[in-house]
Amino acid sequence: MKIVSAEFMTGAVSSRQYPTPMYPELAFVGRSNVGKSSLINSLLNRKKLVKTSQTPGKTQEINFFKVNDDLIFADLPGYGFAKVPAPVRNRWKKMIESYLLKRKSLVAVVLIVDVRRSPSPLDIDLQRWLHACGVEYIMVATKADKLSQSEINKQVREINGTFFGEREGEAILYSSKSGRGKKELWSRILSQVEGHEAGK
Ligand SMILES: Nc1nc2c(ncn2[C@@H]2O[C@H](COP(=O)(O)OP(=O)(O)O)[C@@H](O)[C@H]2O)c(=O)[nH]1
Ligand SMILES: [Mg+2]
């Protein structure tokens, strides 16, 4: 898709603050520091639309970005930062779950993992939960530029084995640094959008 404009809309901590659901929406989610903000910037060909490397676990807002007059990207707060106290973690969980279940314009979740790491229980729980709730998701394994191709092959086997097992599906290999996987991810996003519109 040609990106003509990409702009920050608003940050929200509760559903009352969400922007009007005027376009199909994609939500981006993953552990703190996984490379979520970098991935959104890379998809939108922007360097600093979404701030990267903030204090992990600090952002507790959902940040909404308007892409042309076509889509909304929602940057969900990262999870899994050890120093976040339990009440904050619980608030995160409530906010995210209610967003994912109630947001009518949500087309799919882009679930991002680090290709160098074994999937964490938090990632696995979230994927199972999305699956159980019937929320569409696209798995992405990012930071591919940090590994050799043979290391990538090994990691991708583990990641796909963990998340999909015998089921159909695989993670899209991505690098926000090199742009690897960008075409493929855009094409998955747009086909989800079409599928969503057709199913209305
Ligand atoms: N080499 C490389 N570094 C990345 C990539 N994606 C993110 N990073 C780096 O990883 C750190 C965390 O990225 P950020 O996008 O802020 O992660 P977030 O917390 O998930 O939003 C930053 O230092 C980024 O520059 C990538 O694809 N390749
Ligand atoms: Mg971020």
Image (cartoon, grey):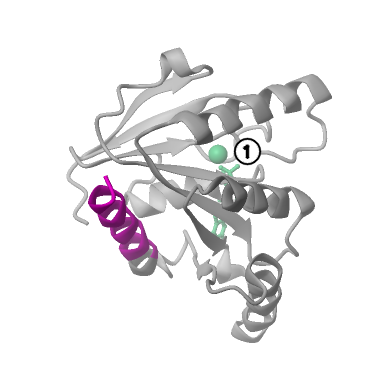
The residue identified by callout 1 is 78
Q: In this view, does 198 lie above or below 116?
A: above
Label 1, residues with CA under 10 Å away: few <14, some 14-19, many ≥20: many
Residue name at image x 51 percent, y 36 percent? 100
Residue at the top extreme, as displayed: 16
Ligand 1 within 8 Å of disc 1? The answer is yes
Q: In this view, does 157 lie to the left or right of 135?
A: right
Q: What stretch is highlighted in magenta?
A: 185-200
Report helix, strand or loop for mark 1.
loop
Picture quarter containing residue 50?
top left
Instruction: Give the main secondary structure of the magenta stretch.
Output: helix
Residue name at image x 48 percent, y 37 percent? 75
Q: Does the magenta stretch include residue 191?
A: yes
Q: Is residue 151 above or below residue 191?
A: below
Residue name at image x 35 percent, y 33 percent? 65
Residue at the bottom extreme, as displayed: 150
Residue 52 appearing in the image:
yes
The front one of 153 and 165 is: 165
Instruction: Please state the horizontal and vertical placement of residue 108, each as a whole percent of the image.
Output: 43, 48
